[in-house]
Amino acid sequence: MEYQMIAPEHSEQVLEHLRRNFFADEPLNKAAGLCQNGSSCPALEAHCAEAIQHRMSVMAVDAKEKGACKIVGVVLNGILKPGDTAKALSKLDCNDDADFRKIFDLLHRHNLKHNLFEHFDVDCMFDVRILSVDSCYRGQGIANELVKRSVAVARKNGFRLLKADATGIFSQKIFRSHGFEVFSEQPYIKYTDEDGKVILPVEAPHIKLQQLYKAICAGDQDE
Ligand code: ACO
């Protein structure tokens, strides 16, 4: 397996990987019925494409796959500044994809309520936004390696704080094993509409959203 930084010219290949793996499999996308495996989702694709532009993302490539390189895992990382989440939340009203709105309303509001910027007094954060591994390559440590490399990228670029919104128990375990700590949690059964109906009926074993963070000190070494 090879690990490489993702450049903007890889965007279409990365999106194709996400359409076949992340878009339908990620717990909140699945609960919302955001899209079928392999189909496109313009709102989510725009969110992913924006992260790629920050040039902080990493991919796992299987060079042995039928003589051609195949992307088998990605972690999309972006730079988050104070005010970005409030702006993204206000833009959400104009988005015509109701399922996308359900997911990002939860994420943005949770982040605004449990505000890492205020708590840590930083002016930017390294935001681990999308973690995805090809379903045929799971269980081989690829996600672990992608998170490890993301921490190294953050450190190299001088970030003091990393964050991730982990939506399922496996990604939560992965982040914690790389030194991330839980800052806040939101049980999915408590995300309800005005009639008390659960908005995102997320399947077990995933029961809550966790906002995790990792603070980096100047003298810290890579794992
Ligand atoms: N069942 C049990 N344990 C699991 C599973 C599983 N399905 N998946 C991962 N784990 C555990 C592993 O046992 C391993 O534990 P260890 O370090 O103690 O050995 C750890 O999690 C890491 O395993 P990896 O092999 O590195 O994980 P993998 O490469 O299989 O990728 C991922 C995990 C990214 C969650 C993958 O299943 C996936 O793409 N799922 C769909 C998309 C998704 O949910 N992404 C995360 C959303 S949150 C976010 O994007 C910020």
Image (cartoon, rainbow, N blue to C red):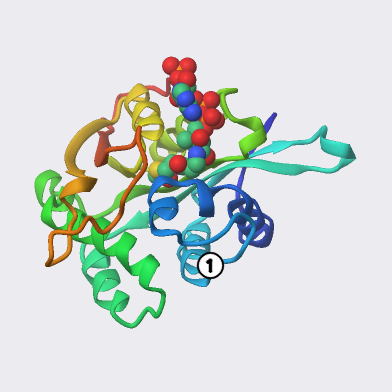
Q: Is residue 198 above or below residue 83?
A: above
Is residue 155 shown to the viewer in this render? yes
Q: Measured from the top left, where is residue 86 in percent x and y?
A: 21, 68
Q: Measured from the top left, where is residue 28 in percent x and y?
A: 38, 51
Near-viewer residue (170 or 178): 170
Q: In this view, does 97 lie above or below 219?
A: below
Residue at the spot x=14%, y=44% of the render? Answer: 120
Is residue 157 shown to the viewer in this render? no
User: Count of labels shown?
Assistant: 1
Residue 59's image quarter?
top right
Q: Measured from the top left, where is residue 45 in percent x and y?
A: 52, 65
Is residue 147 rendered to the left or right of residue 167? Answer: right
Quadrant that contains the N terminus? top right
Residue 139's image quarter?
top right
| Amino acid type, label 1 | Cys
Residue at the spot x=39%, y=36% of the render? Answer: 155
Is residue 65 rendered to the left or right of residue 44? Answer: right
Q: Measured from the top left, where is residue 43 in percent x and y?
A: 46, 70
Residue at the spot x=36%, y=42% of the render? Answer: 158
Is residue 7 rendered to the left or right of residue 115? Answer: right
Residue at the spot x=55%, y=23% of the render? Answer: 141
Mark 1 sits on what residue? 41
**The furthest residue to the bottom:** 94
Quadrant that contains the C terminus? top left
Secondary structure under tag 1 reads: loop
